Amino acid sequence: MTTNAQEFARARGAMPGGVNSPVRAFGSVHETPRFFVSASGPYVTDVEGREYVDLVGSWGPAILGHAHPAVVKAVQDAAAHGLGFGASTPGETELAELIAARVARDGEAKPVERVRLVSTGTEATMTAIRLARGATGRDLIVKFAGHYHGHSDGLLAEAGSGVATLAMPGSAGVPAPIAAQTLVIAYNDLGAVHEVFEARGDDIAAVIVEAAPANMGIVPPAHGFNAALADIAHAHGAMLILDEVLTGFRVGPAGWYGIDPVPFSPDLITFGKVVGGGLPLAAIGGSAALMELLAPLGPVYQAGTLSGNPLAVAAGRTTLDHLDDAAYARIDAAATTIADAAASALEEAGVTHVVQRSGNLFSIQFAAEAPTDYDTVKAQEAFRYPPFFRAMLAQGVSLPPSVFEAWFVSAAHDDTAVSRIVDALPAAARAAAEATPD
């Protein structure tokens, strides 16, 4: 039997850093990464045969639980007919129709009339930006510090998630003229939004925003913030791109768009994670007039050999079909129990903290007051998270290996799984309390 340490040593000899996505290296939590070989429901098992209750959920897609029987069967059935054709399939249309039908508010407002399927969230946001630029004839994009929209050139400045974990404000390899096309401002600050539009409004194609940020930990939008963004952008002839790669179909049947307390009108919405059911798939949606500017009907080019892969659309369709009100109720209830237990354990241990939530997404921030933007997120006592993480891992609970990530609960997290998490929290809280800065 191999060990996680042996697997990591072997991986480092074959791949940069031994991983294919940076946060998997467990660098910020000072631990050997776990190499998983199987998963079922709320559990994952590593190469050493150890089982963990999972709160990563493949970073969101495993919303029904790992290896959900219906999803697995749908993929197997699709695979039996061919892994891909390089041509259109009925399944693509069915998934596109399902996405458009679900993204509604009060049964009336439906911002998605057409859908383009792609393979990754990065590709979705990159395409949305290209489409906004093509539609407006403008070059500049406004984004918010700490928001992560994939790793395309120009969007990594002050991004959250893995970039924050690695303490990288941007990325080498991005030409300065490309980076200069992105204007980065503070989140939840409407004054900054007004200021940037007053200064450069005629050149701004779009504002891109995480619907409810989850890549610098959970930092909910201020009441009415998204609606104000839409109003300001539209007043200046610009567009609002709503990034729901993480929140889409996770926090509710219509994503954050469906539950934001103040109605608003995004021009484009990007989806990922849940929409692919665990396989590589993402999407962009918007009005027919806007989306049909994409090739082959319009002048904005986008293509992908594996876009709309039949296995991925089968997984996505089946996942969405099983995400009914009962499933969301189970996820919400489990998330509430775990979040409340984490807060109680940390309070009992005397650890300064807040637990922030956006729907069923939540995260711990080691701060006295709830962070509202990237600067206040970075000011927290992040050094407390690695020992907290390691203590949970030692007790068989797999958390996101970064304080800048959300915790993901699934419909498969039953009372047994939740109890194992709750039971592990007091020892982890004590480890956090005893932590000191490096």
Image (cartoon, rainbow, N blue to C red):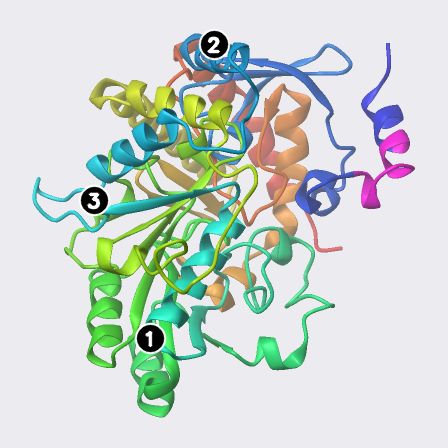
Q: Quadrant of residue 201?
A: bottom left
Residue 404, relative to residue 192: is it above or below? above
Q: Residue 34: percent from the left, percent from the top?
A: 73, 27
- The mark closer to the camera, 2 or 3, is 2
> Which numbered disc covers residue 136?
1
Residue 131 part of the magenta-drawn span: no
Residue 12 part of the magenta-drawn span: yes
Amino acid bearing label 1:
Thr
Q: Residue 394: percent from the left, percent from the top?
A: 68, 23
| Label 3: few (<14), some (14–19) or many (≥20) C-alpha neighbours in 10 Å | some
Q: Quadrant of residue 105?
A: top left
State the residue position of label 3. 259
Q: Is residue 283 visible?
A: yes
State the residue position of label 2. 77
* Secondary structure at numbered mark 3: helix
Q: Is residue 195 visible?
A: no
Q: Which residues are magenta?
A: 9-18
* Secondary structure at numbered mark 2: helix
Rounded to the nearest angstrom, the CA distance separating label 2 from label 1 is 43 Å
